[in-house]
Amino acid sequence: MPVDRKSLDNFFKNFSGLESYEKEEKCFGKRISTYIQGQKWVRRPLVISPAVCSQYGWLCINTNLLECETCGAKLCTPEPKIELYESYKACIEKILENLKASHKTHCPWPLTPAPEFLLKMLPMPKEESLKHFMRRLKCSLEFFSHYPKLKEGISSILGLEKQHVLELCKIANIDSENANHFGISAVSLAATGWTLKTLSSDDQKVFISCDNCQRSIWSRAFNSLTNLKIEETTDSQNDINGPNDENSSSSKIKRLKKDDFDPTEEHRPWCLWIATEEHRSSFHSSDNKISSKEVSEMDNTPGWKLFIKSLLRNVSESQESSIENNPSKEHIRSARGLLDTWTSATE
């Protein structure tokens, strides 16, 4: 059976390595950002999320207009009131159809959309998951003093036990002192799609960012691991000595109520790290909706869970390798016992 062009193209895109993935992700992110800037694409169903529209090369010009970044075709996207459900549903389905059909002749997007791995998490070899994890982790280490304090119990929810965290820190060459200090935050964030970075070279603010859904949140909006005790002390001193004019704005920020960071709750609803097939198909009526039997367990598993499952396979191998290279006392005693037995038998 001959392979169609779309399938062949997606095959090569899916197996072209980390460098190509980063290039695809960057271009995809630029298109996504046009929907987010100015909140031009709010309250739309997940079935026509920014990710779905961006997959076919569309940029968001305004609330009712998309434009193809390659061929320049325009696509009107009016949306009737949701109370008129049948009209609303027909309109959304027409938009879905036109995402492919409204490009100009010879435009490549209908045949070669952005790869599926940018819209939903796909199973990947353990080596690939480790590369993606390390890329985010190493970028974030530069801003280790800005790591947020995570929501209590999140490591258990993620299935990251202490030994997993320490082993992944060891793979990343993070010393044991730092691993114990900020290892849980560092590993949890990188394993759920988050990177700490500045948004421009001259920007002093550090943001917690997701490259897929383009969500960026100022790190100081949350409790900080490093500064939590310092801020409490500073606030106490300010209460005694009165606010310092030079730091008055900083003091106001410190007095604001802050929360711990939940890496599974801060992504946008359609982000591949949290969206499932059930979420994406929830718009459709029961006639068109994929039945629960046809949707595999993997399709209804959050992306972060699939990723961490693959990532932890590296930890298992690392631990096994460590055991082989550093035998336990029991192994040494057993070996000595065998040696003593062999020596006695030969005397």
Image (cartoon, rainbow, N blue to C red):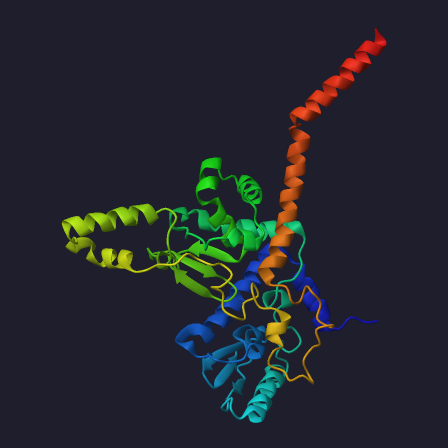
Relative placement, left or right, of 224 versus 312 is left
| Rendered residue at 53%/42% (across/down) | 169
- Quadrant of image for the C terminus: top right
Which of the 4 image quarters holds residue 167?
top right
Vertical relation: 184 (above or below) 192: above
| Rendered residue at 63%/56% (across/down) | 17
How many marks do you count on the picture?
Answer: 0
Q: Which percent across, then down, holds residue 62?
A: 44, 82
Q: Which percent across, then down, holds residue 22?
A: 55, 59
Vertical relation: 213 (above or below) 329: below
Relative placement, left or right, of 251 versus 130 is left
Which of the 4 image quarters holds residue 302?
bottom right
Which of the 4 image quarters holds residue 333?
top right
- Quadrant of image for the N terminus: bottom right
Q: Which percent across, then down, holds residue 52?
A: 58, 75
Q: Which percent across, then down, holds residue 98?
A: 60, 85
Relative placement, left or right, of 204 versus 35 is left
Residue 138, visible in the rendered structure: no
| Rendered residue at 75%/73% (across/down) | 4
Residue 230, visible in the rendered structure: yes
| Rendered residue at 64%/81% (across/down) | 106
Please tell me which residue lies in front, 307 or 129. 307
